[in-house]
Image (cartoon, grey):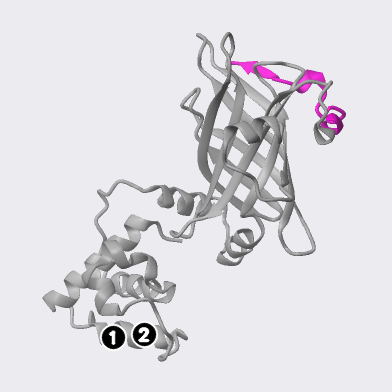
Amino acid sequence: MLGDKRKIAILKKIAQLCKSKSHPTFTQANIRRRAHEKGWPENQKTKGTLSKYLNTPETSYENVPVVFYDVMLEMLREEEINLPSDEQPSITDFYAALSAFMGISPDEDSETKETLPGTYWMYMPSISRPGCIVKALLYIREERSGSLSAEELMYYPNEGCSGHVKQISKGHIVGKDGHSLMILNDPSSYMPKLYMMRTIIGPNRKALRLSGGGMMVNTDTDSVKIFQRKIVCVRTKEALPKDKKTLIEKHGMGIHGKDTKDEVIRGLFDTMTPREHGQAVYI
C-alpha cells in the first residue's frame, strides 16, 4: 500500500519522464499497454484519464487505479530511477508502513476494511478512578486514501468543576489473523496508546466485538508510568447523536461505579477485576 505523498511523487516523476523523453519507454501509451497486460480492461471507466492524472497529481492521485501505480513503479525500477527521498511522510504513509511491518496482505487489508468500520462502545478500567469503568466511543472509518482511521472519544467529569471534559485520540487500526492492532495519540501524555484486540465477527461479516488489552504512558511524574488495562469494544446497535448532553445523560458516556444502571458495564465488573483497574508499572 502506498501513502498519499508517495503516490503524488510517482505521478510527478512519471509526468517529468514522459515530457523530457529522456527515457523512450516512458510514454502514456506504454503505461496503458502494460496495465492492460496486467488485466486492466481497455473499456474500464475511471474517474479521469492517465493524462489528467499526470498533469494534476495533487488532485488526481486518489482516482488512479492501483494497477497503474504497479506499472509505473515497475518501469521506474527497470530503469533504476529513484524517487525523491526527502519528503515528509504523511499519516497514510504510517498506515502503509504499519501494514507492511505487520505483514498484512492486500486480501487481509480488504477483509479488515469490510469487517471493522463502524461505531463501537468502548469499555475500560478508569485510571483516574480505580474501581470504576469508563464508557467511551470508538469510530473506525475507511478514509478516501484507503487507510483505516480510528478515533476514540471520551467525556469524563471535570475534577473540582462542573461539566465534563472532552478528550479525542486519533490514529489507525490494522487487522490480521482475527486480531487488530490500534495505535492512537494520547493528548494527555503526547505518547501513543497501543491496543491489541481479538475480533469477533458476526454472520453479516461485520465485527461485533473487539476485546483485548491496551497500554498507555503517563509522563506527569519524574518516573515514567506505564498503564496496562483490559478493553472491550461493542458495535452500537443504533445510530448515535453527536451532542455531548445526549451522549452523557441518555447513553451514559463517562465513568461508572459498581452501582451503575448500565447492564453491560455491570457484567464487565466480573471480568475487569479491581486489581486490574489502573494497573501501573513504573520505570
Q: Are marks 2 and 1 in contact (CB under 8 Å)?
A: yes
Mark 1 burial class by Cα count in 10 Å: few <14, some 14-19, many 20+: some
Q: Which residue is mark 2?
A: 34
Between 167 and 184, the one nearer to me in the picture: 167
**Three-letter code, disc 1:** Asn
Image quarter in which the C terminus is found: top right
Considering only vertical position in the picture, is 100 above or below 265? below
Residue 16 shown in magenta? no
Q: Residue drawn at (31%, 67%), measured in percent from left and top? A: 60
Between 61 and 18, the one nearer to me in the picture: 61
State which quadrant residue 55 falls in: bottom left
Mark 2 burial class by Cα count in 10 Å: few <14, some 14-19, many 20+: some
Circle 2: element type: helix
Q: Residue drawn at (59%, 46%), measured in percent from left and top? A: 139
103 to the left or right of 234: left
Counting from the top left corner in percent of width and height, residue 177 is at 69, 56
Counting from the top left corner in percent of width and height, residue 157 is at 62, 19
**Three-letter code, disc 2:** Arg
133 to the left or right of 9: right
Residue 268 shown in magenta? yes
Counting from the top left corner in percent of width and height, residue 62 is at 38, 65
Could you give the CA–CA distance between mark 2 and mark 1, rounded to whole angstroms?
6 Å
